[in-house]
Amino acid sequence: MGALSHLRVLDLSRVLAGPWSGQILADLGADVIKVERPGSGDDTRAWGPPFLKDAGGENTSEAAYYLSANRNKRSVTIDFTRPEGQRLVRELAAKSDIVIENFKVGGLAAYGLDYQSLKAINPQLVYCSITGFGQTGPYAKRAGYDFMIQGLGGLMSLTGRPEGEEGAGPVKVGVALTDILTGLYSTVAMLAALAHREQTGVGQHVDMALLDVQVACLANQAMNYLTTGNPPRRLGNAHPNIVPYQDFPTADGDFILTVGNDSQFRKFAEVAGQPQWADDPRFLTNKQRVANRVELIPLIRQATVFKTTAEWVAQLEAAGVPCGPINDLAQMFQDPQVLARGLAVNIPHPLAGSVPQVASPIRLSETPVEYRRAPPLLGEHTEAVLGEVLGLEAGEVQRLREAGVL
């Protein structure tokens, strides 16, 4: 039994932030019912190639993007633009603990599926709305997508090569990080709301915005600005507050050096064959190294090119200096630590035989994550859910299907 096996979640969301949050809850044991449009379903089902291949090697309709955020859920197709569809969703919400949705502000009110409408029939409901800009403010009704939020929210001003270097300019993060972080924050918020409900018996509305999360996750960089009034500039792979803490060239590629204190810098200097660096007044402390990075970084680059990445990693690890290679995903999934932690798993799939998945990072000693279901086929569990949760007979389900409601 999972830690959240006593909970039912109605997931009306699509694309990434909402489904990511729903997948976390599902991994922890919750019964997550994913409500999708008949015919097309979650937009990301079609966001390919690549697509999962069936047992015969042919592409299925399941895009890899969709498969990344929807395991352990049950899929039900309901057209809630129709009155009968709205009734079904309301009945499911009445028997649920959580609703997750990411429609535009006010978008579900026309169907009677907004928080106030569902609260009236289930006062204990925790209702999480995920939007680009939140339920209030001048941008509230705007659509918000990860890429644009990375730009508007300041993240892209910090990523990319510095001015003056070849290829200088802002760069987005290589995954939809703001969506992922919003999914994580949303999960925390819903669990907090459930804890409050345990004490009071009252549910609540959770208002989550991609922009709010993006700004919150600027962390030390936001504080660098707020404490000085100076916007941080792009530093490529360098760190604004720690030196040396970036990538360096090697004889066969590049590696990452992350010196976190003065003792580690002294050890690095010894391994590099330059022990005098640790006693140089310009480099004696991190504060001085940050102030004199323009002098120090070229010296380190001149030294690192004489050993391979593997040599640097082995020698620095032996000396207790944090460092590592820059792996592509093929190399990463073959890394001994990744293999030892079992970060790739396979789940049985009705079309492909099995589907690969990235394992949950959550490790609970008493209620471990279980991989109960592959990301569902569109509408795979419609009959089962409507029968089990709402008590609909097979004939009624068939009538609704023929009427286009399911």
Image: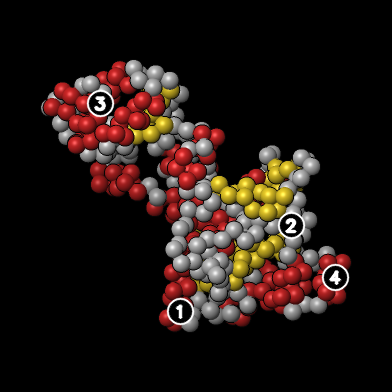
Q: Which quadrant of the structure image shows residue 20?
A: bottom right
**Which sits earlier in the primary sequence, circle 1 or circle 2?**
1
What colour-coding does the image apply? secondary structure
| Residue beneath disc 4 | 398
Element type where label 2 sits in the image: loop
Mark 4 residue type: Gln
Percent x, y for residue 303? 29, 19
Percent x, y for residue 208? 49, 60
| Residue beneath disc 3 | 271
**Which sits earlier in the primary sequence, circle 3 or circle 4?**
3
Q: Which quadrant of the structure image shows residue 381?
A: bottom right
Question: Seen in the image, is 64 located left or right of residue 360?
Answer: right
Q: Is residue 227 visible?
A: yes
Element type where label 3 sits in the image: helix
**Which sits earlier in the primary sequence, circle 1 or circle 3?**
1
| Residue beneath disc 2 | 378
Element type where label 1 sits in the image: helix
Element type where label 4 sits in the image: helix
**Which sits earlier in the primary sequence, circle 2 or circle 4?**
2
| Residue beneath disc 1 | 198
Question: Seen in the image, is 103 located left or right of residue 305?
Answer: right
Distance between mark 3 and mark 4 Cα atoms: 73 Å
Distance between mark 3 and mark 2 Cα atoms: 57 Å
